[in-house]
């Protein structure tokens, strides 16, 4: 019976790369031509017995490894793809064999990721049992309800048609000549018998808003700015007046648990409050007329900078859409508080995890608007605008709550935006996140890329603490 041919090109290439050899150098040591070695590495030629013996003697290679004994990783890959999360993704085992043979490092990485996922799932399961035993809301399998809601809202468009239509119709019924807060106070009192009161800090020290059903009073903290007070009143009014529209949008999200629905209902109520404060047609018209100048828009509609920026990321009504903006908000430690986009947050193209983005520099210049163009490793470019947002007022001795927001759009659309003047400056080279970025010599690098091996050399020190090959 003919001997089975051994195609082990990727393994030969991995050995060569590990030794930092060129194809010419390895071919010379094996006494073959570089072109023949190239064909072997591309699995277009099998390994002969002579070459196997040569590899074993010159580079101390285990012949069993070269003969394709990948049964261990193959069995583990079968376990990975037997998981309900991945079942049905592959038609048979042949693809797994090809992965294990042709890309053993990638197969090992997949197995490690799966083990980490299973470990985290087990820990979350333990947390679920603990919370349930203590009477807390159960945690959805695999992730927290808050994470599920965040991921859902980040993936989809920021436009909710039913809420927008209902908000415009409701806003048209409010008394004319009054600002939003006054109009909503009047509606709450006359239609629902609810009185609105602003309470001092010592009476309501740790709440923004509280509705007392017994006395039918809505309490709002004096810590809040006028714009934030109006927003909290609008959230309460939207919860009462726009509930059918909110529930209809909620049903479309197809969330997995009652707790996730409760969180999503709250988020949709805040979106509805923005729609009440800045009715779609009026705000879209003003946004286009001012070339999306956020400071002018917030002054015209009596809202905060953050509220006006968030509203810009929702304007995607079919037939009446604005420039598709996206936004991120973080705190001073870099924790992501929210991500949203008119067409969904562009995670794959933009990322938003680069320390060179101007959203981080904004903390050094509170209250200042920073605009610049950034370019990604793949050549995609974006116009970004960042500014800090001030939290509630604080008493003496308390630390100020300050966050930063970044709103951006594709640079190709920047000419229609007032901040597009920044496009005349040299663009800033950024990446999606340090772990996914292969830019060399980056002074801001915080982590090595997972796609490249570390290039530690005691004779050489690069600009980054995480030099890589």
Image: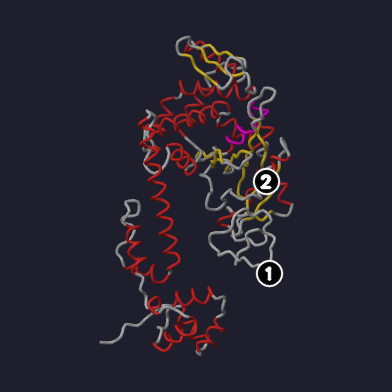
Image position of 237 with respect to 163: above or below: above
Q: Earlier in the sequence, mark 2 or mark 1?
A: 2
Q: Is residue 327 above or below residue 177?
A: below
Q: Main secondary structure of the magenta part?
A: helix
User: Split into 4 quadrants, where in the image is the N terminus?
Assistant: bottom left
Vertical placement of residue 96 versus 229, above or below: below
Nearest to viewer (mark 2 / mark 1): 1
Q: Secondary structure at mark 1?
A: loop
Q: Nearer the viewer, residue 101 or 262?
A: 101
Helix, strand or loop at label 2? It is helix
Decide if residue 270 is on the left or right side of residue 43.
right
In the image, the segment drawn in magenta is 298-310
Numbered tag placed on residue 459 in the rendering: 1
x and y percent of residue 394 in the render?
A: 66, 24
Work out how far the residue at label 2 is from the one at label 1, CA to CA, in angstroms.
35 Å
Q: Quadrant of the C terminus?
A: bottom right
For label 2, count other residues whose C-alpha is less than 10 Å away and answer few (under 14), some (14-19) or many (20+).
Answer: many
Q: Position of residue 386 (x, y in %)?
A: 66, 41
Say few, some or many: other residues with alpha carbon within 10 Å of mark 1 (under 14 / 14 to 19 / 20 or more). Answer: few
Magenta span contains residue 111: no
Residue 416: x and y in percent read 66, 45
Q: Which residue is mark 2?
A: 358
At x 44% / y 83%, what residue is drawn? 56
367 to the left or right of 245:
right
């Amino acid at each position: 019976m003919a001997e089975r041919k051994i195609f082990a090109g990727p393994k030969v290439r991995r050995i060569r790369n590990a030794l930092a050899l060129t194809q010419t150098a390895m071919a010379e040591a094996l006494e073959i031509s570089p072109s023949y070695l190239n064909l072997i590495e591309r699995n277009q030629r099998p390994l002969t017995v002579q070459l196997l013996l040569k590899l074993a003697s010159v580079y101390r290679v285990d012949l069993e490894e070269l003969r394709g004994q990948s049964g261990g990783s193959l069995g583990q890959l079968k376990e990975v793809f037997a998981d309900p999360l991945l079942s049905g993704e592959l038609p048979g085992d042949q693809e797994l064999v090809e992965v294990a043979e042709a890309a053993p490092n990638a197969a090992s990485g997949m197995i490690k990721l799966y083990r980490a996922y299973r470990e985290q799932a087990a820990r979350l399961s333990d947390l679920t049992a603990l919370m349930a035993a203590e009477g807390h809301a159960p945690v959805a399998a695999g992730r927290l309800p808050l994470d599920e809601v965040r991921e859902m809202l980040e993936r989809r468009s920021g436009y909710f048609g039913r809420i927008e239509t209902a908000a415009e119709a409701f806003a048209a019924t409010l008394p004319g000549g009054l600002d939003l807060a006054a109009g909503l106070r009047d509606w709450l009192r006359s239609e629902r018998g609810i009185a609105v009161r602003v309470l001092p800090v010592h009476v309501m020290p740790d709440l923004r808003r509280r509705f007392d059903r017994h006395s039918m009073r809505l309490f709002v903290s004096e810590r809040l700015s006028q714009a934030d007070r109006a927003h909290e009143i609008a959230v309460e009014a939207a919860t009462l007046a726009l509930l059918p529209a909110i529930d209809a949008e909620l049903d479309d999200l197809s969330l997995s648990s009652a707790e996730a629905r409760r969180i999503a209902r709250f988020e949709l109520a805040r979106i509805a409050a923005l729609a009440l404060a800045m009715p779609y047609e009026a705000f879209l018209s003003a946004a286009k007329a001012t070339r999306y100048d956020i400071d002018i828009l917030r002054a015209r509609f009596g809202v905060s900078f953050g509220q006006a920026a968030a509203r810009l990321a929702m304007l995607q009504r079919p037939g009446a859409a604005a420039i598709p903006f996206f936004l991120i908000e973080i705190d001073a430690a870099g924790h992501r508080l929210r991500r949203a986009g008119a067409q969904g947050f562009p995670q794959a193209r933009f990322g938003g995890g680069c320390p060179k983005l101007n959203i981080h520099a904004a903390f050094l210049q509170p209250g200042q608007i920073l605009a610049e163009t950034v370019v990604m490793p793949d050549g995609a470019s974006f116009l970004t605008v960042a500014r800090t947002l001030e939290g509630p007022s604080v008493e003496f001795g308390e630390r100020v709550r300050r966050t930063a927001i970044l709103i951006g759009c594709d640079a190709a659309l920047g000419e229609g935006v007032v901040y597009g003047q920044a496009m005349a400056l040299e663009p800033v080279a950024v990446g999606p996140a340090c772990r996914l970025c292969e830019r060399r010599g980056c002074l801001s690098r915080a982590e090595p890329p997972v796609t490249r091996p570390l290039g530690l050399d005691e004779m050489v020190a690069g600009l980054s603490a995480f030099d890589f090959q």
